[in-house]
Image (cartoon, grey):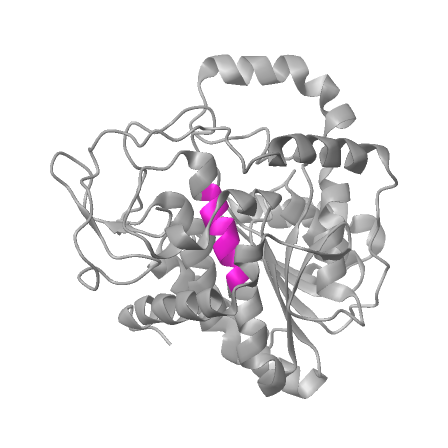
């Protein structure tokens, strides 16, 4: 299960806890080195694979929606996962060009991201201090806390828009021989994509609410995926199960929708907060063509098909438009899932208010166990 916490890898190691709950709060689960669960790597719900293929072709052949330009002067924005050639980078570049003060994160060389943004924004006449960058590893609680403290210092405690774009997808073409876990024992997609995002949002929430009270408009935008349909609420709260990477990724993306909708229910009236979750579209980006831990044969195969990518995938700029729309549209209605710059319907599990509430409460207990506020 995507949300399970585990002990160290190795023979006899076992996982405990669920959905971000600290170890010891749930019964012991199967060992990490138990035989793989017979999960079909490419299995969708009945019929959804064909419907997704048709939907993808329609998305490619139809007119690409573009977010309407909005004056973002005076607005402070964070975009996580803004490595050059990524969707997040295009989001950050656009918002900075529209006048926002943007802080971006990268897991490694944040300085290179800032330099690239400033270079690309040169023609827009943006001032150098309008773009900042800092390293952030969402799977590391210390890194998340360091980033939040750094941002609070450079911004004077102001934050209008948080765009939770960063995420990972690993081991895409095979079932795991053993579960990939973070240093603190969580399944790696769950730890990075969901728990790290929850942690960061909780630390920045006081700034968002204060800015919302002052300006009347604060936002949290979670970049989910249509792959959330590979997740289910049952797996959010069940004992651990052996998952392939696509299912684990889908679980984390389903949790991000729950997170956005529960944020809206809890804080919309308190701090003029509007939230959104979204699918950006299938894009030719550093994530799609830069899968971690990929074998040499796959890298070589991708090079052969790279010239065809624009024919079958969106560009990062096209895929950035729904995120930009959710972050800027003046009349956006909070608490919804979006595709192609418009409201869309997620799977029914994502609309289960009781599951959203339970997931929030259990994850918040994990957050409080970190001793961070």
**Residue 247 position in % (x across, y down):** 45, 39
- Position of the C terminus by quadrant: bottom left
**Residue 72 position in % (x across, y down):** 78, 68
Quarter residue 130 falls in: bottom right
**At x 40% / y 33%, what residue is drawn?**
244
Frontmost residue, 263 versus 71:
263
**At x 51% / y 75%, what residue is drawn?**
205
Quarter residue 177 falls in: top left
Image position of 302 with respect to 252: above or below: above
**At x 64% / y 87%, what residue is drawn?**
213
**Residue 4 position in % (x across, y down):** 30, 51
The rendered magenta stretch, by its main secondary structure, is classed as: helix
User: Which span of residues is magenta-colored?
Assistant: 249-258
Q: Residue 97 colored magenta?
A: no
Frontmost residue, 139 versus 115:
139
Residue 211 appears in the rendering: yes
Image position of 109 with respect to 26: above or below: above
């Amino acid at each position: 299960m995507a949300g399970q916490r585990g002990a160290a890898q190795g023979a006899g190691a076992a996982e405990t806890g669920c959905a971000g709950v600290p170890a010891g709060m749930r019964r012991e689960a199967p060992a990490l080195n138990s035989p793989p669960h017979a999960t079909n790597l490419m299995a969708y719900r009945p019929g959804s694979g064909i419907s997704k293929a048709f939907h993808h072709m329609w998305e490619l052949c139809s007119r690409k929606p573009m977010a309407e330009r909005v004056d973002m002067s005076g607005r402070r924005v964070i975009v996580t996962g803004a490595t050059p050639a990524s969707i997040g980078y295009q989001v950050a570049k656009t918002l900075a060009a529209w006048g926002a003060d943007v802080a971006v994160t990268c897991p490694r060389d944040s300085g290179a991201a800032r330099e690239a943004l400033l270079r690309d924004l040169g023609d827009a006449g943006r001032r150098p201090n309008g773009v900042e960058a800092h390293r952030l590893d969402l799977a590391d609680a210390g890194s998340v806390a360091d980033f939040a403290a750094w941002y609070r210092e450079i911004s004077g405690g102001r934050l209008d828009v948080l765009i939770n774009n960063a995420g990972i997808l690993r081991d895409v073409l095979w079932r795991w021989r053993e579960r990939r876990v973070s240093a603190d024992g969580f399944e790696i997609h769950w730890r990075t994509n969901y728990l790290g995002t929850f942690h960061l949002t909780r630390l920045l929430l006081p700034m968002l609410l204060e800015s919302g009270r002052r300006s009347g408009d604060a936002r949290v935008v979670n970049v989910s995926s249509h792959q959330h349909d590979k997740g289910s609420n049952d797996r959010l709260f069940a004992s651990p199960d052996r998952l392939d990477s696509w299912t684990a990724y889908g679980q984390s993306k389903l949790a991000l929708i729950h997170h956005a909708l529960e944020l809206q229910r809890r804080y919309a009236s308190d701090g003029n907060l509007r939230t959104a979750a979204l699918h950006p579209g299938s894009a030719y980006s550093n994530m799609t063509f830069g899968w971690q831990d990929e074998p040499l044969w796959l890298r070589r195969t991708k090079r052969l098909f790279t010239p065809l990518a624009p024919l079958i995938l969106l560009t990062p700029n096209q895929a950035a438009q729904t995120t930009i729309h959710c972050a800027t549209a003046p009349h956006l209605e909070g608490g919804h899932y979006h595709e192609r710059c418009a409201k869309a319907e997620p799977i029914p599990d994502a609309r289960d208010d009781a599951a959203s509430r339970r997931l929030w409460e259990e994850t918040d207990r994990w957050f409080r166990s970190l001793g961070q506020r």
